[in-house]
Image (cartoon, helix red, strand yellow):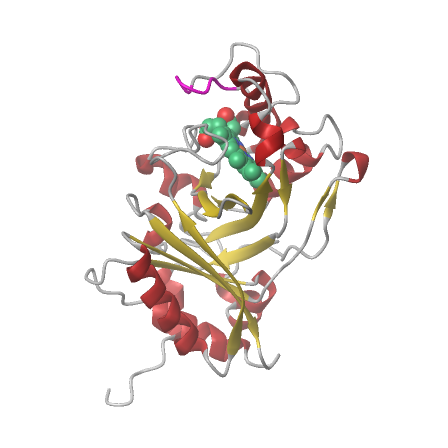
Amino acid sequence: MAVPQTGIFALGTAAHAYLELDLTRTDDAGELVSALAGLAAGRPTTGAANLVVGVRPELWAQVAPDAAIVGLGGFTDPVVGQDGFTMPATQRDAVVWVAGPAQDVVFDRAVEVTTAVAGVAELVAETFGWTYHRDLDLTGFVDGTENPPLSEAMGEVVAPEGAPGAGGSVLLLQKWRHHWADWTSLSDAQQEQVMGRTKVDDEELDDPPETSHVARTDQADYGHILRRNTAYGTVLDHGTTFVGFASSRAPLEAMLASMAGVAGPRDALTRYSTPLTGGYYAVPALSDLERFVEPAADD
Ligand code: HEM
């Protein structure tokens, strides 16, 4: 049975790091996958940290063509929507998401990751994330309510048994800067029209506007995804790291186009928040990564 990377589903982690890596030599995709496999596969249950690794889809397909999700490619072109609104394409060769109970644990694991890939890949971007009042994002709304429950999530966001890439998932990682002053100048009622949900009770509005975030990303229209977003940043510069998993790229891509207003109204949330980065990653099953773990010298 294909075993997905378990960190995708881990709960109760207050501290996070997203480490974006680029190959230092372009012909080392196999070595990079081996290094990442060594980090992700065979992790002990001690150590208090989860680790999820993602590989640029084209590199994963090159190294493991039999285990690649069909039709999955990287974020190579920006998504351009209404009024010149643009979601930039900042695809990297790999990403490692480290999550744990506290920043010290996550920092130590993050350093270990960069040491493990040294000589093959370099850390080109890093974002440290944290949970805000447990389930809120920095808009003050509960984020994640309409996620599938864990009992269903695995069936919905990993490629099914028997399909190419079974047990693997697709990650969209996107960093969004929030515009605090503009957002907080709105009343709660106005913010609720932007989101399409109530702020305190976290209920969907009876008739959410077409431009509301929940209308632009309605999973009944676009398919189901699992969001593991966190807050990032400081008082001067902060926002949401969007961390979305799906069994293929299609629902994520369709939601981005819908939010940008490529063929319809633009998501009102994009007036208060700007995407700074965007990359799609193959998140292979642990059982596929295991094939690439280099035996230890004394094995
Ligand atoms: C600044 C960035 C973002 C923020 C702050 C944000 C916040 C939220 C909030 C507060 C909700 C309502 C509660 C919930 O169901 O979780 C929500 C719903 C949702 N968001 Fe986002 N989101 C962001 C970006 C995105 C992006 C980029 C996507 C897709 C690629 C997305 C997909 C969804 C989906 C699928 C839902 C549930 C819709 C439904 O009701 O079926 N979000 N988001």
Q: Give the dominant element type of the magenta stretch: helix, strand or loop.
A: loop
Whether residue 33 is visible here, answered yes or no, is yes
Question: What residue is at 80 percent from the left and 35 percent from the top?
Answer: 83
Nearer the observer, 7 or 287: 7
Provide residue 299's location: percent of width, then percent of height. Answer: 24, 86
Residue 221 seen in this snapshot = no
Which residue in the rendered view is the most extreme toward the top?
A: 206
In the drawing, does residue 192 fall left or right of residue 148?
right
Residue range of the region highlighted in magenta in the rendering:
197-202
The percent coordinates of residue 261 (x first, y second) are 72, 32
Q: 99 or 127, which is in the foreground?
A: 127
Identified at 42% across, 29% down, the residue is: 142
Q: Quadrant of residue 34?
A: bottom left
x then y, percent, for residue 298: 24, 90
Let me know if residue 198 is in the magenta part: yes
Residue 275 point in image, percent of width and height: 63, 45
Position above or below: 71 against 255:
below
Residue at image position (29%, 84%) is 296
Q: Residue furthest bottom?
A: 298
Please identify the quarter of the rendering in which residue 259 is found: top right
Eyeballing the image, is 195 above or below 149?
A: above
- Residue at position x 55%, y 20% from top? 196
88 is within the stretch colored magenta: no
